[in-house]
Amino acid sequence: MLILKNWIKEILAVFVFFRFKNLLDLYDYLYENKIEKGIYATVFAYMCEKKGCFIGYFAQFKNRPYFPHGLHGVFISGDSKIGKNCVIFQHVTIGAVRTRGSKNIGNPTIGDNCYIGAGAKIVGNIKIGNNVRIGTNACVYRDVPDNAVVVCAPTRVIEQSQPLDNKFYVMQDDGTVEYYYDGKFYKTNDKEVY
């Protein structure tokens, strides 16, 4: 019976993705229309399960983050808030604390232009400032000011005096360099980034 249900979900997914380009477009549609049930929601949940990811229905994004390695292992709890131009690598957890008696009960709020390394964990009702870099496998459980770098556990915050440029740069096969900003890629002549 389980195989039959998954087969039906696969067929539904084919039809759903005639309308939506990708999983994030489907998420945007569900969020904007406050849809939690039905075919679209079922296909969204099924595809997230297939990719090993989770995006809570009420997670809020100022614009679409860039996921350089896709959504593999990414967990974003509902009611989390993520600012503009964020780059989120694989296996990142942006999670709520819901345990009775715990400090920081709630969901994280992440500022604009943040760069979150692979495996980072951001948990609880904390605020991550703008232009913050969170290193690979860092566990963040307290507020982080603007223009800071967060590395390893225990969390160490290294404040910066100038805003950090957290644009994500990619070199294309033809040698051109592009950076991700405001939801899309732009070409640049700056070859120093590679």
Image: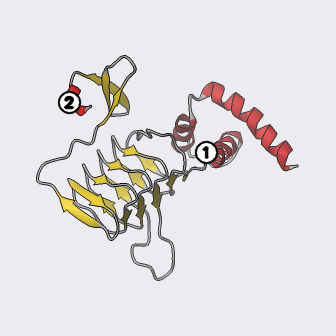
Q: Tell me if mark 2 has few (under 14), some (14-19) or many (20+) residues whose alpha carbon lies within 10 angstroms of its own.
A: few
Q: Between marks 1 and 2, how big is the CA–CA gap?
A: 34 Å
Residue 3, x across and y down, in percent? 84, 45
Q: Which residue, as the protein is rendered here, is positioned at the far left?
A: 161
Residue 27, x across and y down, in percent? 55, 41
Circle 1 residue: 51
Q: Earlier in the sequence, mark 1 or mark 2?
A: 1
Q: Residue at x 80, y 38 (%)?
A: 8
Instruction: Classify residue 62 by image quadrant.
Output: top left
| SS at circle 1 | helix
- Left or right position of 107 against 152: right
Q: Tell me if mark 1 has few (under 14), some (14-19) or many (20+) residues whose alpha carbon lies within 10 angstroms of its own.
A: some
| SS at circle 2 | helix
Q: Residue at x 68, y 48 (%)?
A: 37
> Which residue type carries mark 1?
Lys
Q: Residue at x 33, y 63 (%)?
A: 152
- Left or right position of 98 against 159: right
| Mark whose residue sits in front, 1 or 2 | 2
Residue 11, x across and y down, in percent? 77, 33
Question: What color scheme is it?
Answer: secondary structure
Kindly indicate whether the residue at mark 2 contacts the one at mark 1 (C-beta within 8 angstroms).
Answer: no
Q: Residue at x 52, y 38 (%)?
A: 24
> Which residue type carries mark 2?
Glu
Q: Nearer the viewer, residue 94 or 139?
A: 139
Q: Nearer the viewer, residue 21 or 52?
A: 52
Q: Is residue 79 above or below residue 192?
A: below
Q: Which residue, as the protein is rendered here, is positioned at the far bottom?
A: 101
Instruction: Classify residue 84 by image quadrant.
Output: top left
Q: Quadrant of the C terminus?
A: top left
Circle 2 residue: 192
